[in-house]
Amino acid sequence: QVQLVESGGGLVQAGGSLRLSCTASGRTFSTYAMGWFRQAPGKEREFVAAISWSGDSTPYADSVKGRFTISRDNAKNTMYLQMNSLKPEDTAVYYCASRRKSVPGTGIYEYDYWGQGTQVTVSS
């Protein structure tokens, strides 16, 4: 079993930056791929970024490519999402997720464990 806890959300002006963290419990963190998803009000949850267990594979959604950077520190059981040049359309609840495979996936149903989410609000 893996438990995930997100932190780092908040309110920021357009053009600003935030860094989200996701801390996991469980001894198998380092062997699991991880991902970030987001859900805006009235919209479906969507893929943002993912990372393999080794960190050498990091797919991104087109909407965040070049602005967001995903990373992980297996020694700390923590994954990060550095978000730069934030836009109002990035406003959403951001969720971290993990899957019982070492390679990242981009689909919601590919992930086995989910955090509770952290709110990110970008004002214009």
Image (spheres, rainbow, N blue to C red):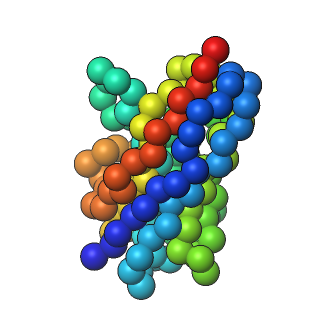
Residue 44 higher or lower than 105, as above or below: above
Q: Nearer the viewer, residue 25 or 99?
A: 25
- The N terminus appears in which quarter of the rendering? bottom left
- The C terminus appears in which quarter of the rendering? top right
Q: Nearer the viewer, residue 47 or 22?
A: 22
Where does residue 118 sit, x and y in percent of width and height?
Answer: 45, 45
**Quadrant in which residue 16 is drawn:** top right
Where does residue 9 sit, x and y in percent of width and height?
Answer: 55, 44
Where does residue 57 sit, x and y in percent of width and height?
Answer: 58, 57
Seen at 34% across and 24% down, the residue is 41
| Horizontal side, residue 17 vs residue 88: left or right | right
Seen at 26% across and 48% down, the residue is 109
Where does residue 12 sit, x and y in percent of width and height?
Answer: 65, 31
Q: Residue furthest front?
A: 11
Q: Nearer the viewer, residue 58 or 3?
A: 3
Seen at 61% across and 65% down, the residue is 72
Question: Is residue 62 visible to us here?
Answer: no
Q: Residue furthest bottom?
A: 27
| Horizontal side, residue 113 vs residue 93: left or right | left
Residue 16 higher or lower than 8, as above or below: above
Question: Is residue 9 visible to us here?
Answer: yes
Seen at 53% across and 20% down, the residue is 89
Residue 80 higher or lower than 88, as above or below: below
